[in-house]
Amino acid sequence: FGMGISADYIQSHDINSHTIIENHPQVIEKLYKWADDKPNVKVIPNGWYEVKDSLGKFDGILFDTYGDDDMYQFSSSLSSWCKKGTKVTFWNNETQDTNFYNIPNVTYKEIGIKPKSNSYFTGSKTYYMPMVEYV
């Protein structure tokens, strides 16, 4: 959930359900407050790797656990969450189209951005959004 930016964007669309997995105690508290008036949000207060086998299938997946000790397990876990047509993206902190997780058939969309100065993003003026659709 982090800062809630992507969650707000996802909620701005017509979606039936929205599952958010968060393991940071302070962020979980913020997440529950944010989700309080959103009946389509399911909060899972845990690490994604601990619950990976109980999640089910999704239409879309945004993976943002850069720096998580289990992040290298993402690629091998992904197929169990995807059905035909599932759209997947993940946080890409690189200033190029780098397939950090070695996921097959990834393409990238270059997006011009104006990032605030922070340690979370490199500060590039272009974000390379990874995209993959499972078939």
Image: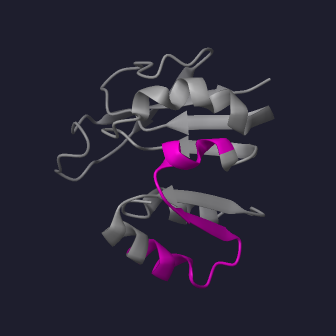
Left or right for 69, reference 89: left
Image coordinates of residue 59 in percent, x first then y, are 75, 45
Image coordinates of residue 132 in percent, x first then y, are 63, 27
Where, by quadrant of the figure, is residue 82 drawn?
top right
Please determine whether, in this image, residue 111 is positioned above or below residue 22.
above
- Asked whether 129 or 7 is in front, the reply is 7
Where, by quadrant of the figure, is residue 94 drawn?
top left
User: Residue drawn at (35%, 39%), measured in percent from left and top?
Assistant: 66
Left or right for 65, reference 63: left
Left or right for 122, reference 101: left
User: Residue drawn at (63%, 15%), measured in percent from left and top?
Assistant: 105
Image coordinates of residue 49 in percent, x first then y, are 50, 42
Looking at the rendering, the stretch of residues picked out in magenta corresponds to 30-53
Name the quadrant of the C terminus. Answer: top right
- Asked whether 61 or 6 is in front, the reply is 61
- Asked whether 76 or 41 is in front, the reply is 76
User: Residue drawn at (64%, 67%), measured in percent from left and top?
Assistant: 42
